[in-house]
Amino acid sequence: MELNDKTVSKMSLRQGALIYFIGIGGSSMSGLAEISLNRGYRVAGSDISWSPASEKLEALGVTVHVGHSADNIDGSVDLVVYTVAIAGDNPEFLKAKELDLPIVERGVYLGWIADHFDKTVAVSGVHGKTTTTSMLSNILLEAGMNPSAHIGGVIPGLESSVITGGSEFFVTEACEYHKNFLHIRPFAGIILNIEPEHLDYFKTFRNMKNAFIKFAKGIPENGYLVLCADSEYALMCAEYTKANVITYSVKSESAPSVENALGKKVLTHFYAKNAELKTPSSDSLECVKTGYSYTLVKDGSDVGRAELQIPGLYNVSDSLAAAAVASALGCPDDKIIEGISTFTGAKRRFEIVGKTGKGAVVISDYAHHPSEIKVTIDAAKQNAKGKVIAVFQPHTYSRALRFKNDFSKALVSADKIILTDIYAAREKDTGVISSRDLLNLFLKKNLPAVLISDFDEIAAEIKKDAGEKDIVLLLGAGTVNKIADKITV
């Protein structure tokens, strides 16, 4: 029995009910499993391999199976949660259908969880969701507002992708893929940016923009829609919402001239004044992440000086989004500044993972869209005293085909590019595009690129070529971060 948004809203699970997660080791699913456990449900699940998330859940008392088997599902299960990433012939999914158990897709279940909170904040956009969600959560924690949070990455210090608080506030990433963010009915929503992405699903950019418009329409009149004024298509969504519109910008101190569907102008506008890259005080490893210092401005008035610890102007922009929502939720100005200034970044978001034997700094980043890759390389170039060596693992064949020219533009600033095989993820290789095709394009455009498939060979190349003043970037949403263990000491 498949549950949708309407039917799941009528679902009432008793305390102690057993929820089974197919694919429990993923960042989103493991977070939902932990939240469910915290709400008094029993939890079990499975995944194709063991992971740190699985280990943590097992330590909390969750039964985690390695591998999918029909034997793991029986009549004692009260609800089955699955992701669209599983195969249609998954034995646990088929067994649940055979037993006519309640079955719900991950995004629908997240929406049901969010409905239990009075003030849910949904963070959407093609880039920056994890950083913004983490930073907003940190601000609310610093302010003592005791939020719950569901994040698509690991939060440093907590070593978790979830916060289980006890207040009315719930902060969650809201992913556009498969229109999953439309299952969430937020009190406040953020649209960080809108660019062509996931066109394997949306087919056209117009369809994708329409999904974001529908997301904006779903925010209530007494709620808030926070928009990046520097993103044309994000700002476009203002006219479709009845919610209060709040904007932010790293380019303009003045609020944009837009109105919501009720004819109301921008309620509040945030700006980063005098944003400047902080100068490293030493040659220590941590000083690669010099960060930004800026004055937070709200409607033309200085709020205070924020000392952001992570580099890249794009992170300044994300911090403004977090500040805007926190302010709308009633967070004091001084706590907003404190929360921004104490945030140290999310895992695999310009994360320093160590040094090579010759002293090159190794940074792992989840960047897999051309825009993300460009700003990550730019941030590295601001910090590097030597070369920036980019190890790039393309993510999915459809994205590689769609953005092959954009990837060449995004990588142009790197001093050396080591390209590796395309990470298939959910897709099958149809032979239409390969990393060899990308390499030929890069070489045609005179980019300093090589193609190396084997990770051990990549490690050997880095050890040979990267010196003490260089930065090595491991770029991609797949397995490229595994190279870090092979090159760091």
Image (cartoon, rainbow, N blue to C red):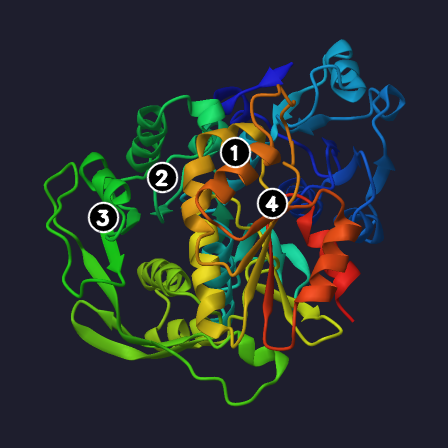
Q: Is residue 231 above or below residue 178?
A: below
Q: Quadrant of residue 24?
A: top right
In three-dimensional space, the C-alpha distance between marks 3 and 1, rounded to whole angstroms, equals: 38 Å
Sequence-first disc among 3 and 1: 3
User: Do labels 4 and 2 touch, CB within 8 Å?
Assistant: no
Residue 254 x, y percent position in the rendering: 14, 62
Determine the residue positioned at 10% across, 50% down. 257
Amino acid type for the residue under numbered disc 1: Ala
| SS at badge 2 | loop
Rendered location of residue 77, percent (x, y):
78, 26
Residue that mark 1 sits on: 400
Name the mark on residue 195. 2
- Whichever of callouts 4 and 2 sits on the residue coming sooner in the sequence is 2
> Could you tell me how far apart the alpha carbons at marks 4 and 1 are, in whole angstroms?
13 Å
Classed neighbour count for the residue bearing mark 3: other residues with Cα under 10 Å, few (<14), some (14–19), many (≥20)? many
Horizontal placement of 465 versus 281: left or right? right
Marks 3 and 4, how far apart in space? Answer: 35 Å
Residue nearest the viewer, comparing 383 with 322: 383
Question: Quadrant location of the C terminus?
Answer: bottom right
Alpha carbon of mark 1 to alpha carbon of mark 2: how far? 16 Å
**Mark 3 or 4 closer to N-term?**
3
Q: Give the labeled residue for mark 4.
A: 477
| Residue located beneath label 3 in the image | 244
Question: Could you tell me how far apart the alpha carbons at marks 4 and 2 are, in whole angstroms?
Answer: 18 Å
Viewer-side label of 3, 2: 2
* Quadrant of the image occupied by residue 278: bottom left
Q: The residue tagged with tag 1: helix, strand or loop?
A: helix
- Contact (Cβ within 8 Å) of mark 1 with mark 2: no
Task: Give whichever of discs 3 and 2 has the lower sequence position.
Answer: 2
Q: Residue at x 68, y 53 (%)?
A: 481
Q: Secondary structure at mark 3?
A: strand
